[in-house]
Image (spheres, helix red, strand yellow):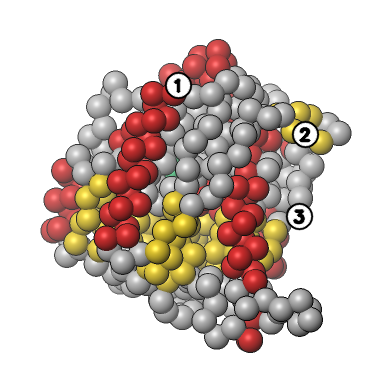
Amino acid sequence: MFQRSNSAVSVTEHPSCPVNSFNEWDPLEEVIVGVVDGATVPPSHIALKATLPTDQLEFFRKNAGKPFPAERVTAAKKDLEEFVHVLEAEGVKVRRPQPVDQLKAFGTPGWTSTGLYAAMPRDVLLVVGNDVIECPMAWRSRYFETSSYRPLLKEYFRGGARWSAGPKPELRDELYDYDWAETSEGEPFRSVITEYEPTFDAADFIRCGRDIFAQRSMVTNDFGIEWLRRHLGPEYRIHVFEFADSHPMHIDATLVPLAPGKLLINPERVRKVPELFKGWDVFHAPRPIMPDEHTLYMTSKWINMNILMLDEQRVVVERSDEPMIACFKEWGFKPILCNFRNFNSFGGSFHCATLDVRRQGTLQSYL
Ligand code: NVA
């Protein structure tokens, strides 16, 4: 319990810290599941153009600053409710962020924006051990996105967790390459962000005990990766990979460690499995079966591999994704099914929609 007289709340005073998660598979005890309420189309900006599916650019241009269609939000919300029930039935404690008014304009001396949503805790918060880190995000519309999680962050801190934040970015025009244009096959990766200041999204990192895998992306620059490396210190090793993806944003539909010695890869993007995984079982995600007519506002169909491990066996998989369900069974996992297609429309699946706040287990090396 936090006591006012005891001004220095030290982690060592709290043997059972409410935040404890070192990898993607230790038995899950507590998780934050996002909310889609109030989801709003962000104002047009070059940083979005570099990541959104081309068939969605017109929708984003026309609807900038307006709420996403109400019927889609309602359908996504229904998926989230089912997901919460599925998790609770599996014995996991579920927490939710507080919806905020995403239509309310905010800004800095250099720019103004409206918000996006609080649907994807994985993007904005990174849990490493007992440290929960608010990320310095590159999209202006996401500048205050952690506000929705503040009540939970305060509670976790009071319970003994560490609470950190990357350097507050300015997000001035100097951060963006306004001349950004598509690259052709074989050309080196061209990011829409510069090295003006450190920025990163949590979802460009995926944890595997002492080793953390990362990618540079349309929102994560070298400066941001270096900030995180120094913040975490010598106990952790951050490995930066480059994949065959000209629009990278979030690693969890590309390379997903499932359990010790078990790796799920996107066979289109991971052309050569990094040497580090020598001796691991490498599973190729089956091709997505999402119908073309199903709206995906922000991602490719490869979010079929954006699964959530509840422990080394149980994995939450989209109910209609028969190839993925069959593969997981064949690979020796136990799929737990949940409808999630309507949520998928908003830019992610089970991994994106969650933040595993507490898993059993300790810091270990798996490589
Ligand atoms: N940007 C990725 C999704 C990451 C969850 C993709 O579109 O495949």
Which amino acid type is marked by label 3? Pro
Do we see residue 206 in this rendering? Answer: yes
Image point (83%, 31%), residue name? 110
- Whether residue 73 sits left or right of residue 102 in the image: it is left
Measured as percent of width and height from the top left, residue 209 is found at 47, 73
Residue beneath label 3, please? 167
In primary-sequence order, the first of circles 3 and 1 is 1
Q: Quadrant of ligand 1?
A: top left
Which of the pair 271/327 is nearer the observer? 327
Q: Nearer the viewer, mark 3 or mark 1?
A: 1
Q: Tag on residue 163?
A: none
Q: Nearer the viewer, mark 2 or mark 3?
A: 2
Image point (62%, 34%), residue name? 101
> Callout 2 environment at 10 Å: few (<14), some (14 to 19), or many (20+)?
some
Which amino acid type is marked by label 2? Gly
The part of the image, by quadrant, that contains residue 94 is bottom left
- Whether residue 299 sits left or right of residue 7 in the image: it is left
The part of the image, by quadrant, that contains residue 102 is top right
Measured as percent of width and height from the top left, residue 49 is found at 57, 25
Residue beneath label 2, please? 107
In primary-sequence order, the first of circles 1 and 2 is 1
In primary-sequence order, the first of circles 2 and 3 is 2
- Secondary structure of the residue carrying numbered label 1: loop
Image point (47%, 38%), residue name? 36
Residue beneath label 1, please? 69
